[in-house]
Amino acid sequence: MAHAPVRGPMSKRINVMIDEDTWRFLGRVPVGERSRAINHALRAWITRHRRDDPVREMQALRTQLPKIRTDEVTRWIREDRSTATKCQYH
């Protein structure tokens, strides 16, 4: 007897095309576990891309923004800390 996949309250049924080698691998996943395995893999992919996208955006910005010397950044940080400290005691 086949098991119906466990679906949460917001589950959606979709049709997708996959490569033959992926299909052979998926064929080894027990029936009833395939949706869960695909969902798990897709969530892992999404998590990686959520982390990678901001990094790519920052790298693109680096090429567009002017270069700033380290001593200038250090001065800004010290000024900011000094201002923050003064504001705390007023």
Image: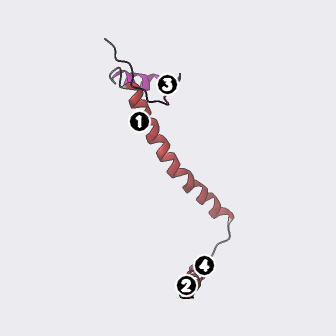
* Identity of the residue drawn at 54% across and 83% down: 81
- Label 4, label 2: how far apart the Cα atoms are: 15 Å
Foreground residue among 67 and 51: 51
Q: Earlier in the sequence, mark 3 or mark 1?
A: 3
Amino acid tagged 4: Arg
Secondary structure under the numbered disc 2 in the rendered image? helix
Which mark, residue 78?
2
Dot 1 corresponds to which residue? 40
Earlier residue among tags 4 and 2? 4
Q: Secondary structure at mark 4?
A: loop
Mark pair 4, 3: CA separation:
50 Å
**Marked residue nearer the N-terminal end (2 or 1):** 1
Cα distance between the residues tagged 2 and 1: 46 Å
Majority SS type along the magenta span = loop
Q: Are marks 3 and 1 in contact (CB under 8 Å)?
A: no
Distance (Cα) linking label 3 and label 1: 16 Å
Residue pictured at 51% horizontal, 23% vertical: 13
Q: Which residues are magenta?
A: 3-28
Q: Could you tell me how far apart the alpha carbons at marks 2 and 3 are, in whole angstroms?
A: 55 Å
Residue that mark 4 sits on:
69
* Image: 8 above or below 63: above
Q: Residue at (54%, 84%) from the top-left corner? A: 88
- Viewer-nearest of discs 2 and 3: 2
